[in-house]
Image: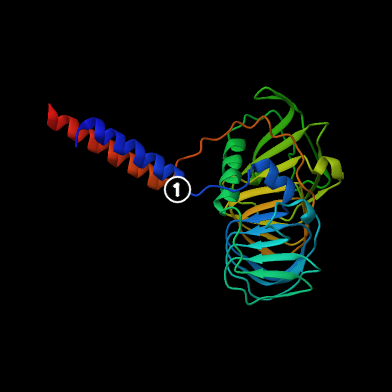
Amino acid sequence: MPVRGLAAFVGGALVLALATAPASATTLTASSILGEFNAVVFHDVSGSCCDFEGPVVIGGNLSGGGTFFNQGAAGLSTGYGTANVYGNASGHFNANGAQVYVAGTNSATFSGGSVHSGASFADPFSAFQAPLVALSHELSLLTANSTLPAHNHPPINNGVIKATPGLVNGVNGIAVFNITAADLADFASFSLDVNAASAVVLNVSGNYTQTANIQNIVEANRAKVIWNFYDATILNLTRFEGAVLAPYATVHNASPIEGTLVASAFDPGGELHYHPFTGDLSFVKPADVPEPVGTAVLGVGLLGLIGLRMARRK
């Protein structure tokens, strides 16, 4: 085949590969997900406990028991309900009139709910996972402009963590903390003063397994807070306020989480309360979206054939 013809073949093949790659049917961004869903769990949710007040998306299986409510469900895209399970479902749940979608095998009872078994979702689960993982990574790279108060004699009771918002990536009013799980563990209880910030990011490195209670964050301010446990694999929480972003962690809570939860897996021991994130994320730099592996391999292989053909013609 002439090189020009081979090149045309390569171009056509790449266009075909890109055209057939799976794509999201809706535009899911990290902001839209955090603002609509009460929880996004990449793998399994298992445990017989507690309430899920707002919509949840589960990439793996749902098992055990609990109660689903309908807060926030009315504003969701078509084909999503209060409970959205990409895997299988088993156990007994109170659904309170909720719409429940299960893509896999459903052997669960959802009392009082409308159940859609064998559901086909508008978006692949990766459309939820990818922007949230990217957000966690991008937040973890930010330079801190806020610090914890001096605390020489832990454990600290009734501590006050105060944000000092400033300019971040050209956007004013953003507060960023970069702390360790050990730093946070020095506080037995604390409140968070957002100090008029439009978003407060607390990047926390390491596994956090303490039992501190967060207190006295008013509703409007709570919705601006993101706890980014960007490299944790285990989180054991008591009362936590604000969105919890832990894409690699198995999370257990003993008391309510007042905000959106993003986790690798979830073992609920406390309720999830619906407080959608409304903070400003315009300062976050867009992450590069890697092309599908199949497309990349195809491109490299076919371009290699071009080089080989040209070498033989010399």
Q: In terms of depth relative to the viewer, which is nearer, 238 or 249?
A: 249
Residue 32 x, y percent position in the rendering? 69, 43
Tell me which amino acid carries mark 1.
Thr
Residue 292 x, y percent position in the rendering? 44, 45
Q: Residue at x 47, y 40 (%)?
A: 290
The answer to whether residue 85 is above or below residue 6 is: below
Q: Residue at x 79, y 31 (%)?
A: 197
- Image quadrant where one finds the N terminus: top left
The local secondary structure at tag 1 comes to helix
The answer to whether residue 195 is above or below residue 184 is: above
Q: Residue at x 62, y 50 (%)?
A: 246
- Asked which quadrant contains residue 220, the reply is top right
- Please give left or right for residue 306 compared with residue 12 in the image: left
- Please give left or right for residue 1 compared with residue 25 in the image: left
- Asked which quadrant contains residue 70, the reply is bottom right
Can you identify the residue that label 1 sits on? 20
Q: In terms of depth relative to the viewer, which is nearer, 130 or 77?
A: 77
Q: Is residue 137 visible?
A: yes
